[in-house]
Amino acid sequence: MAKLKKLLKRARELSYLPFPAGTPMDPPLRVPTDLITEFVRAWDDKDAEAIGRLFVDDADFVNVVGLHWTGRRSIVKAQRFGFTHAFPSAKLELLDVSQRLLGDDAAVVIARWQVSGQVDPDGEPVDPRRGVLSATLVKLADGTWLGVSCQNTDIAPAADTNISRGGTVSAASYIKGPTPAEVAASELVDD
């Protein structure tokens, strides 16, 4: 029993890799928001390896449908798959970026984006999508930054939550706005 406890303790200690002293990025991320601009550049170049270099070795990435990729290799593999099948000619447009420093050595960046040129599984074009990417970064010993965790989420227009029925998740809104008749009858609408 003591040996098992010792092994479990050692496993917990090894479950997280130490942060590197320096960055694998070239150019390095000098400020947290560089992660977003370099992500867009690499995404538009369909360079999955460059996206992977934005993150520490044991980073977490949750995509727009909730798939959780753990580790740089998984992130690269998933991005490469997306570029091959869903986004071979797509463009990612950055709409807005903000950052929040969490002390001297951690930050959160949030970006709104739009992607156009995606294709469905049959290769047919689909409508553009908008979303929000949120990333947590750590400052390394050399003063550069790397991503530790990332969450990418689609924006569902006119919705404030999701609902699930019969195994299908769809956007819904509990906020009631004016009816089309009320909008047409309002003084704010020009005829």
Image (tube, rainbow, N blue to C red):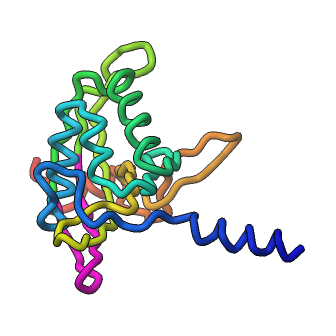
Above or below residue 187? Residue 41 is above
Judge from the rendering whether residue 163 lies leftward or rightward of residue 145; answer left or right: right
- Kindly identify the residue that appears in the image at 67 percent across and 45 percent down: 165
Q: Position of residue 30 (x, y in %)?
A: 12, 65
Q: Position of residue 135 (x, y in %)?
A: 32, 62
Q: Which percent across, then down, holds residue 101?
A: 23, 79
In magenta, the rendered stretch is 97-113
Q: Does 168 sit left or right of 172 as displayed?
A: right
Q: Is residue 47 magenta?
A: no
Task: In the rendered view, tell whether residue 34 sits above or below residue 101.
Answer: above
Q: Which of 79 and 177 is in front in this view?
A: 79
| Residue 60 placement (x, y as % from top left) | 45, 56
Within the image, what quadrant is residue 137 found in?
Answer: bottom left
Residue at left 14%, top 67%?
Answer: 31
Tell me which residue sits at (32%, 45%) in the image: 52
Q: Which of 118 and 47 is in front in this view?
A: 47
Q: Residue furthest right?
A: 1
Please, which residue is most extreme toward the front here? 3
